Image: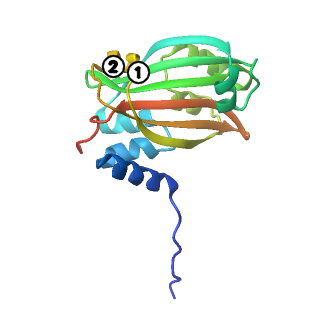
Amino acid sequence: MINKGSIVKNELHDRIREIEQEYDIKFSNTQKVLLSIEGSITAILDVLYGTVSIFTIKQSFEKAGGEKSELLNVGKDDEIHIREVLIHGRGRPMIYALSYIPLSRCKKEAHADIVEGKLPIGKIIKKYKIESRREINDVYIEKPSATLKELFHTSEDFVSRDYVVIENDEIVMWTKESFPISYFSKEI
């Protein structure tokens, strides 16, 4: 006898459908995967488009302050590493990523690789066998900042998602990833 299955609520799926309805758009399957994957986005891009590269745009260290301390669940005076990178492939920028990393929760070896800026976070997590999980906070559409306009040579709206990486029930990173709404809209 086969038991009747139960429905599992997928809040992220519902959020993506809500955005599609609100903006009268239809995301491609590739866009949906990139917005909802809880693993490495660079691994997905490598599979779909061939090897991608990471270019570090800017790095800095500062005190967490108000908003960042809330995103990371750290004290306002805790030092954090801010990293902006561009994932590049097929001769063009693909995804912009901004990350906040509390230094007190980052392994020294992993942090050295983060500062070097040659490896994406997913590969660093794998390299150091960091037992972690990603939790997506939100998916949304937003107007591009001046930086995004310059990097992508467009003023179209961007699709963004932000998530946290959690290890031992502590947030070890907050990341926001963004790409122009027209990117990845055609199926491969």
* Residue under the point 33% across and 15% down: 150
Q: Which mark is residue 129?
A: none
**Residue 132 pos. (x, y %):** 64, 39
In this orientation, which residue lies closer to the viewer: 1 or 141?
141
The answer to whether mark 2 and mark 1 are in CB contact below 8 A is yes
Image side of residue 43 versus residue 129, left or right: left
In this orientation, which residue lies closer to the viewer: 22 or 69?
22
Q: Residues within 10 Å of mark 2 (few under 14, many from 20)?
A: some
Q: Which amino acid does label 2 sit on?
A: Lys
| Residue position marked by numbered label 2 in the rendering | 149
Residue lying farthest to the bottom in this orientation: 1
Q: What residue type is labelled 1?
A: Ser
Image side of residue 49 versus residue 42, left or right: left
Image side of residue 64 versus residue 45, left or right: right
What is the image's colouring?
rainbow
In this orientation, which residue lies closer to the viewer: 105 or 178?
178
* Residue under the point 39% across and 48% down: 19
Find numbered disc 1 in the image and state the secondary structure of the residue it sits on.
Answer: loop
The answer to whether residue 107 of the structure is visible from this angle is no
